[in-house]
Image (cartoon, coloured by chain):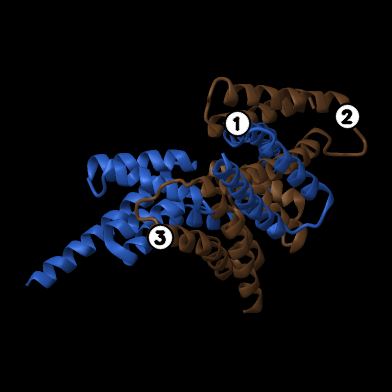
Amino acid sequence: MSLILQVFLAFVRIGAMVFGGAYAAIPIVEREVVDMQGWMTYAEFMDLLALDEITPGPILINSATFVGMRVAGIPGAIAATLGCITVPMIVALALFFVFRRYKDTPLVQSVMTSLKCMAVALIASTMLKLGVAAIAPEAPSIDVVYSVYVCAVIAVAFYLMHVRHLGPLPVMLGCGALNLLVAWLVF
Amino acid sequence: MDNTTEQSSLATRLAALFISTFTISCTANSGYAILAVMKDDFVNKRKWLTEAEMTDYIAIVQSSPGPMAVTSSTIIGYHVAGIAGTFAAVLGVILPPFLVMVLVTLFYEVIVGNPYVTLFLRGMQMGVVAMLFDVIMGLFRSATDKERAYPFVVMALAFAYVRFAGASIVWLVVACIVAGVVKALLVKHKEDQR
């Protein structure tokens, strides 16, 4: 029971801190679940990120269900999922009642800008960690050919999403399929 | 008599809300895609709310923490059918990812034990790095729009905190909110002096 409560409270905290879109959930979950609670290894967290992309719905809900399930089974999954939507629902309803006709005030805009900057910093930090883990999985020893290959895949994937505006799902699936093919042909 | 029609129409609206958000959640993945589909369904097709109301609600949704799918369902559900509507709409949105993820987790050990799946996931992780970079570029642009040094200072400090200081980011959130309030007050003070 106390574990379920712990899971619930951890995800209440996580839900309250996710500002700046769906992907802002990634660094928050990483900090709380991997670093602080130790409920998941970094390798599992990286698997979760890949799974997030091929499953429907918001990343935060996917992550909550996955973590809750791994920590305490179905009751854990329910506790985590309900936990992460608690604060967002309360804040959204509170704002709705306070500002039926909502106008962005300079104050709200200024706070949102700060929180967006925070999201940039948090996501950048997670991206660096993920990038290093992807480029040099056996660190500190480095296989140069493999590292160059990973960098090339990342660069092409970025080009497809950022310049050609392809959705993340086809790009992710393409990366997965490409890696299978390359591993089969080369490594 | 009136009471029963009222109740049946509430039940119909709740069912419609649940079915709509459930369907949307099954098909759309990102927050903005979900908002676009909701707008098309609720404003254009069902006429539950007007375009102006939707615009107001989107502003509220963007100022709330958490996934936009959840916060928009919360508000639109309330608009359509009160607090029961909120729960019907939110339940619809969270059920598909919940059910799929429960299944994925049940088979996780089997899935991840397979070397082909591992290679596929590894490839996808390279894509995740690229996607995060794409997300950062978008957020960076929207945070630095019409601003000067302020966002860069906040980003640098937040990044330094995350990399070199404590693991919890609760204080970072609080500090950012305080910084945002202080900055807004300073700007206002400057304008008043003119």
Q: What residue is shown with label 3?
A: A98
Chain with colour blue in the figure: B
Please say whether residue A61 is visible from this viewpoint: yes
User: Quarter of the image containing the N terminus of chain A?
Assistant: bottom right
Name the residue nearer the viewer: B20 or B52. B52
Q: Chain of mark 3?
A: A
x, y percentage for residue B185?
Answer: 59, 50
Front of the two marks 1 and 2: 1
The answer to the question of whether label 1 and label 2 lie on touching residues, with beta carbons closer than 8 A, is no
Please say whether residue B92 is visible from this viewpoint: no
Query: Mark 1 belongs to which amino acid?
Result: Arg
Query: Mark 3 belongs to which amino acid?
Result: Val
Is residue A104 shown left or right of residue A53? left
Q: What residue is shown with label 2?
A: A143
Element type where label 3 sits in the image: helix
x, y percentage for residue B75?
Answer: 38, 56
Q: Chain of mark 2?
A: A
Which tint was used for chain A? brown
Name the residue nearer the viewer: A4 or B121. A4
Front of the two marks 1 and 3: 3
Is residue A145 shown left or right of residue B173? right
Residue shown at the point (45%, 54%) measured from the top left = B70
Element type where label 1 sits in the image: helix
**Circle 1 residues within 10 Å: few <14, some 14–19, many ≥20:** few
Alpha carbon distance from label 1 to label 2:
35 Å
